[in-house]
Structure formats: structure tokens, C-alpha cells
């Protein structure tokens, strides 16, 4: 069984072709700058061979066509015929109230994805474009939609409802949805395997450019830090996370800003980038902090502190915690981040093994022997999770 996984962003398309019998990635690649000048394509196959080229990509249909061409390429291809692909799994950002699990795409599903455009304006239209491009170029091949919000649909009302007039929930479905669901689900499942116990209270920390934390009890999400949009929660690369909503009116008045400018500031100019004034990349900030840059130091302190506060609140939400899992770019690769966050959590019985914590990008249990809480690094693999969900459905 071969499953193609597609992740269509606003101007990009990431893909992986996975052989599900061995879970081997046969080929993967990235189309960038779709719809702009100088679009680029990179393609890599299982033996390490790869190529990169500039090519005109007007839209996502062009990009999916290039993916097919790459997979069939004479020198860098891994397929003889496109019909060897058994199904396509699509990452879809927003499933709104409609989806609490992956689904096979039909016209009703496409309409529901369309209804969620207003909730995920930067992603859902592109996700649907990717689906429709595949329908056109691979007629008859099953398409599966896997939603970033689906895993969080088990949250109880007390966790997902905002304290706004109830009519806005009824009229517009304004509520917490949560994101990175495929990643939180994958790493929490891996954690239950690593610890050989499926009845656990787990806190999963997806710490990357976008970051979120999730409380998972007996395999089900009960709360998560991102909300109606991926702006809420932790301080992130360029996103502000939690702020007093009154700051928005204050800034609009004082700086004479439009609502779009405010949106841009909160999403693209805040977070670690906004505080440090240096970069949104944690590697740059860590390096600047080591060199004594005070704003880089405070940016990191704010990030660690807020992570620790969320972990504390989720330990309360579940009345305990058995395991804390770190994943994504920073969670997987930054021992100092894990150490600093854990240093706030000794009251929960959290104790790290410094030597074991000194690792990057691989599964490890870095809890000290006397730790009451298991501390794990689990590299996320959203593509494999999407491929598994797709296979299960077909
Ligand atoms: P996203 O998918 O949200 O774009 P990633 O999960 O790829 O983000 O994470 C990107 C972040 O991870 C970047 O800020 C990067 O600096 C950080 N990161 C990656 N590797 C390291 C490392 N070795 N040390 C510290 N931070 C790292």
C-alpha cells in the first residue's frame, strides 16, 4: 500500500509518499512560492538522491502536477504509474464543528471544508484546492481529509467555551478548537506505547515556530492552549499568544492602526521575535542570549515561564500528570528548553536526568530515577499519522 500525504499551505505544498507495509518514506518534497515569481521545487528519494529546480507554479493544481511528475521522474521517480498510489491523505487545518475524525472526501465533506473557510482563511482554501487538484489528476483515487482540529473535539464544554455572550457561540461557533491535533495525538500515542500503559494523564508540548500544549487523559484531549485560532496560548516565534484583549483597542487608538495592522502585529511581529527584536528562530535567540543579549534572555524566560504555567494548569485540569512529552523543532532539539521548563515543575515531582536530556531528535525517556512524572522526547511525525489514518479509512 502506498499513501501520498499532502500538506498544502498558503503558498507551499509539502508531500511524502509512504510505503505503509514498511512505513518507509519513498519520496518527499516541497513546492514553495506557489503563485509567486521563482517558484521552487525540491524532491528527495529514499536513497538520499535529490534535486532542486525553479519552475513556474501558478496555483496548487500546477504544484500537484509537479508532485506527480517528480514521483514518475526517469531518474528521481519512485513509481512507474500514478495508479500505484492507493490513496491520498490531506492535512486540513480546520474541521470546525463538523469533524471529530478523519473522513473520506465526498462532495458533502468538501462543502463542510468550504464552510470552514471563515475559520481558517489562510489554510482551508488551499487545503481544498489540493484535494480538488488530486481529484482532477488522479480520478478514482480515494482522498482522505485529516483535520488539525479533530483530536481536540473531545474537549468538554467547560474547556472549549469562552466567557462571551452565548449567542456568539450559537451564531458563529466562536469557541476553542485547538490545533496541531495530529501531532498531539501521534506523540501521546507513542508515549502510551513507550510507557506500555494507555490509561495515563499526559501533557504534550508541541514547541516549534507555532507552539501549543495539550492535556490528554486516557488518549482523549481534554484541553489545549490554542483556541478559536492558532494565536492563543503560548508565546510563539512571531505570535503573541495570550494577551489582555483590551490591549487591542488601546493600540488601535494610540497608534491609529487598522484592524488588519493589529492582526499582522499579533500574528507576525510579536512573540519571541517581537520581544527580542532579533529573530523568530529559537536557535538565533539562544545564541544571542548566550552572548549576553538581554532582550533575547527575557524572550526565552517568557517562553519557558508560560510553558510551565500551562503545564501546571493542565496538571490541575487532570488532577495529576503521569507524563510530559516534548516534541516539534524546539521540543525535540533543545535540551536547554526542556531543562528550563522542567525547573519550574519540581513541586509536581518532576526531576530530569541531565545526561539523558542532552539529546536531539530521537525518542528518549529523560526522567531521573526519582522523578514522579515520566519526561519524554518524541519526534512528531504528522505525515505518518495522516498516512495511518488514511490507510485505516480505506
Ligand atoms: P513549524 O513546523 O511550526 O514551522 P518546527 O517544529 O519546524 O516549526 O520548529 C521550528 C523551531 O524549532 C525554530 O524556531 C527552530 O529554531 C527550532 N529548532 C530547531 N532545531 C533546533 C535546535 N537544534 N535548537 C534550538 N531550536 C531549534
Image (spheres, rainbow, N blue to C red):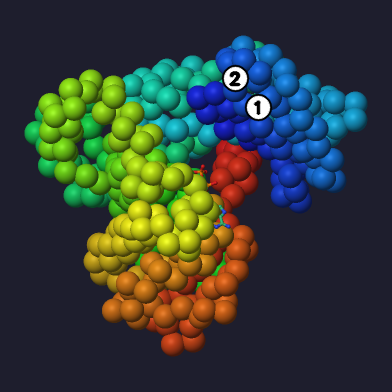
**Is residue 361 among the parts visible in the rendering?**
yes
> Which disc number belongs to residue 224?
none
Picture coordinates of residue 242, whole percent (x, y): 25, 46
Question: Extreme bottom residue here?
Answer: 370
Q: Which residue is mark 1?
A: 31
Q: CA distance from mark 2 to mark 1?
A: 7 Å
Find disc 2 in the rendering and name its residue. Answer: 34
Classify residue 193 as left or right of residue 241.
right
- Return the residue nearer the eye: 59 or 267: 267
- Image quarter in which the N terminus is found: top right
For the point 49% across and 86% down, the residue is 369
Asked if disc 2 and disc 1 are in contact, CB closer than 8 Å, the reply is yes
Residue at image x 16%, y 38%?
Answer: 247
Instruction: List x then y, in percent, for residue 266.
Output: 30, 35
Tell me residue 301's x, y (percent): 34, 61
Up the image or down, 61 lies above or below 166; here it is above
Residue 191 appears in view: no
Amino acid at each position: 500500500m502506498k499513501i501520498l500525504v499532502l500538506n498544502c499551505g498558503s503558498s507551499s505544498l509539502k508531500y511524502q509518499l509512504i510505503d505503509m507495509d514498511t512505513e518507509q518514506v519513498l519520496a518527499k518534497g516541497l513546492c514553495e512560492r506557489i503563485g509567486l515569481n521563482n517558484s521552487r521545487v525540491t524532491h528527495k528519494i529514499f536513497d538520499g538522491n535529490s534535486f532542486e529546480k525553479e519552475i513556474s507554479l501558478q496555483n496548487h493544481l500546477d504544484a500537484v502536477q509537479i508532485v506527480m511528475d517528480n514521483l514518475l521522474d526517469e531518474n528521481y521517480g519512485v513509481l512507474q504509474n500514478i495508479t500505484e498510489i492507493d490513496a491520498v491523505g490531506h492535512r486540513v487545518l480546520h474541521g470546525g464543528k463538523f469533524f471529530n475524525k478523519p473522513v473520506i472526501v465526498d462532495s458533502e465533506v468538501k462543502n463542510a471544508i468550504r464552510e470552514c473557510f471563515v475559520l481558517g482563511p489562510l489554510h482551508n482554501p488551499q487545503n481544498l484546492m489540493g484535494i480538488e487538484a488530486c481529484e482532477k489528476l488522479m480520478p478514482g483515487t480515494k482522498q482522505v481529509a485529516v483535520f488539525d482540529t479533530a483530536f481536540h473535539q473531545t474537549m468538554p464544554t467547560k474547556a472549549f467555551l469562552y466567557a462571551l455572550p452565548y449567542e456568539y457561540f450559537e451564531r458563529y461557533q466562536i469557541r476553542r478548537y485547538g490545533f496541531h491535533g495530529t501531532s498531539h495525538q501521534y506523540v501521546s500515542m507513542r508515549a502510551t506505547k513507550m510507557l506500555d500503559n494507555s490509561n495515563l494523564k499526559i501533557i504534550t508540548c508541541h514547541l516549534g515556530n507555532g507552539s501549543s500544549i495539550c492535556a490528554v487523559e486516557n488518549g482523549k484531549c481534554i484541553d489545549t492552549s490554542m483556541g478559536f485560532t492558532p494565536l492563543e496560548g503560548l508565546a510563539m516565534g512571531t505570535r503573541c499568544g495570550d494577551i489582555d484583549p483590551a490591549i487591542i483597542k488601546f493600540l488601535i487608538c494610540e497608534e491609529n492602526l487598522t484592524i488588519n495592522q493589529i492582526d499582522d502585529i499579533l500574528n507576525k511581529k510579536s512573540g519571541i521575535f517581537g520581544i527580542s527584536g532579533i529573530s523568530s528562530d529559537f536557535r538565533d535567540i539562544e545564541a544571542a542570549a548566550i552572548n549576553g543579549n538581554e532582550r533575547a534572555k527575557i524572550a526565552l524566560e517568557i517562553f519557558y515561564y508560560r510553558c510551565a504555567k500551562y503545564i501546571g494548569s493542565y496538571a490541575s485540569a487532570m488532577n495529576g500528570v503521569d507524563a510530559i512529552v516534548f516534541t516539534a523543532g524546539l521540543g525535540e532539539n533543545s535540551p536547554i528548553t526542556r531543562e528550563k521548563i522542567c525547573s519550574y515543575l519540581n513541586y509536581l515531582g518532576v526531576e530530569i536526568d541531565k545526561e539523558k536530556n542532552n539529546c536531539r531528535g530521537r525518542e528518549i525517556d529523560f526522567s531521573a530515577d526519582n522523578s514522579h512524572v515520566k519526561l519524554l522526547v518524541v519526534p512528531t511525525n504528522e505525515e505518518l499519522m495522516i498516512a495511518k489514518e488514511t490507510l485505516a479509512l480505506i
